[in-house]
């Protein structure tokens, strides 16, 4: 895990094209965990939207942009914690990504300033 975190840190601190940087990070996470698909999203609080920035896997998500109030990702953002669902079809919050998806884990990542505001 330390190796993965170090490699991710090296990727994200490198100055360059944001899209390419995040695509490299998604690919690294996917290969390190042997996941079928990894997506990275931006949260637009002012616009009330969550947007897919990039992914690594078999294709684009069915909902590349969705309201901040919908989906498992939105639950992870609102709760400020990981959401791990073993059977997505049984969870009414689930927004279908692929018809074959059975489980999802959403790990929200916040910048240091946001984290400090939430924990002060």
Image (tube, rainbow, N blue to C red):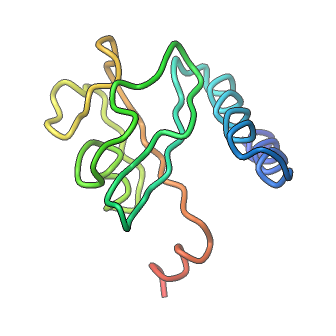
Residue extending farthest to the bottom is 120
Indicate left or right for 69 with 63 as reference.
left
Q: Position of residue 61 (x, y in %)?
A: 41, 25
Q: Position of residue 17 (x, y in %)?
A: 77, 44
Q: Position of residue 15 (x, y in %)?
A: 85, 53
Quadrant of the rendering where the N terminus is positioned? top right
Q: Which of 2 and 94 is in front in this view?
A: 94
Indicate left or right for 105 with 23 as reference.
left
Residue for point 39% across, 49% down? 50
Q: Which of 33 and 57 is in front in this view?
A: 57
Task: Tell me the quarter of the picture where residue 111 sits.
Answer: bottom right
Residue for point 41% across, 57% down? 81
Residue for point 52% across, 17% down? 36
Q: Position of residue 80 (x, y in %)?
A: 40, 62
> Where 35 sits versus 107, above or below?
above
Residue for point 31% across, 28% down? 86
> Where 12 sits versus 38, above or below?
below
Query: What is the number of callouts on the image?
Result: 0
Indicate left or right for 29 with 60 as reference.
right
């Amino acid at each position: 895990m330390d190796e993965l975190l170090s490699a991710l840190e090296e990727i994200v601190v490198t100055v360059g094209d944001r899209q390419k940087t995040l695509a490299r990070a998604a690919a690294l996470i996917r290969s390190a965990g042997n996941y079928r698909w990894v997506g990275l999203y931006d949260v637009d609080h002012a616009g009330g939207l969550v947007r897919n920035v990039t992914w690594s896997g078999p294709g684009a998500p069915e909902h590349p942009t969705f309201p901040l109030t919908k989906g498992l990702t939105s639950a992870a953002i609102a709760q400020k914690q990981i959401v791990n669902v073993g059977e997505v079809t049984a969870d009414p919050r689930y927004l279908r990504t692929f018809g074959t998806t059975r489980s999802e884990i959403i790990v929200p990542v916040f910048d240091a300033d946001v984290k400090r505001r939430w924990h002060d």
